[in-house]
Image (cartoon, rainbow, N blue to C red):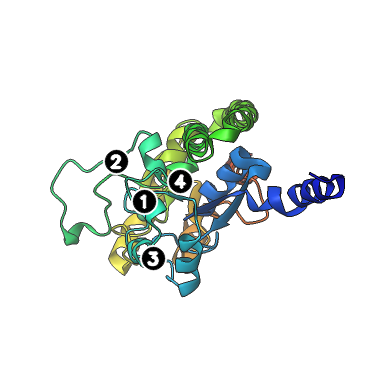
Amino acid sequence: MKTWLRLLMSVWLLLGGAASAKVKVVATLSDLGAITREVGGELVSVKVLARSTQDPHFVDARPSLVLDVANADLLIINGMELEAGWLPPVVTNSRNEKVQRGQPGFLDASTLVTPKEVPTQKLDRSMGDIHPGGNPHYTLDPENAVKVSKGIAERLAQVDPAHASEYAANQAKFAEELTAKVAAWKQALAPFHGTDVVTYHKSWIYFVDFAGLDEVAFVEPKPGLPPSAGHVANVLGVMKARKVPLILQEQWYPAGTSEQLARISGATLVRVPGQTPEQQRYIEHIDDLVHQVVAALAKKRG
Ligand SMILES: [Zn+2]
């Protein structure tokens, strides 16, 4: 081969060739997107279908989501039915064989963790929006994020075997940093062990278990149902009787009822992003969450 041609080839590889070889990952939710970025680094491009400010139970299935999934090499979903209301037609309409359930390009991240609150009795509509596989909000426990990152690294290695060692190394680095943070967060939360909290939606069990807190009531009477006057009166009764210092909820839920409950009972309302904001790392997101909870509980104590 002529020298100039070889030179041209290597320039092409440096510029376009290498860039176009990125593994195209689509994650349904931003926690999974953020964890995938840690593990995939420069080797992957990550698109997230739902904005971090959107309630993940109800995402508008815009046509652009179908196009994103159509181009994906790997689709990572939260699973446990969290996206059941909007994702199935998006995946079907993408006509992308690679990312259909059962293919290597499809990863249900809930298979990587131990589910909590798996219903033991038969479900019916009167119970509200209960997920039959268990509570799907598992990425709020940072120790689950370690497991999820490992599963994503293994799946990326399967889809892109040439870079298996890089994915493993990135994952080990992320897990080390996250594990150190977990110890620090547990230490910060330790003084508040056993504190009662009220949450808006039944989405906090993984976090309150991690934090050593006790969920004693929910502002929603049943998952997915708006608060009724009678139910709110009951919650207020519980809050006053037990001197509950904290109401915790995601920003995508309305604030009004919780603000009133906080005002009357003397609790602090903490509204946080329920998923990693686009400009943050997963670790920063949980760090903010822990610090806001600790600040609210410390204020009450002091
Ligand atoms: Zn839910």
Q: For the N terminus, which image quadrant? A: top right
What's the mark number on residue 90?
A: 3
Q: Nearer the viewer, residue 220 or 96?
A: 96
- Among the two numbered marks 2 and 1 on one chain, the one whose residue lies closer to the N terminus: 2
CA separation in Å, label 2 and label 1: 10 Å
Say which amino acid is labelled 4.
Val
CA separation in Å, label 1 and label 3: 26 Å
Dot 2 crowding, Cα within 10 Å, few <14, some 14–19, many 20+: some
Q: Nearer the viewer, residue 32 or 57?
A: 32
What's the mark number on residue 288?
A: none
The response on whether ligand 1 sits within 8 Å of label 1 is yes
Label 1 sits on residue: 202
Q: Is residue 207 left or right of residue 79?
A: right
What's the mark number on residue 117?
A: 2
Q: Residue at x 60, y 34 (%)?
A: 163
The response on whether ligand 1 sits within 8 Å of label 2 is no
Foreground: disc 2 or disc 3: 3
Say which amino acid is labelled 3.
Val
Dot 3 crowding, Cα within 10 Å, few <14, some 14–19, many 20+: some
- Among the two numbered marks 1 and 4 on one chain, the one whose residue lies closer to the N terminus: 1
Residue at the outermost front position: 1
Query: Are discs 2 and 1 less than 8 Å apart at CB?
Result: yes
Q: Nearer the viewer, residue 186 or 47?
A: 47
Q: Secondary structure at mark 3?
A: helix
CA separation in Å, label 2 and label 4: 23 Å
Foreground: disc 1 or disc 4: 1
User: How far across and down, in percent of the image, does residue 91 sit?
Assistant: 38, 61
Label 4 sits on residue: 244
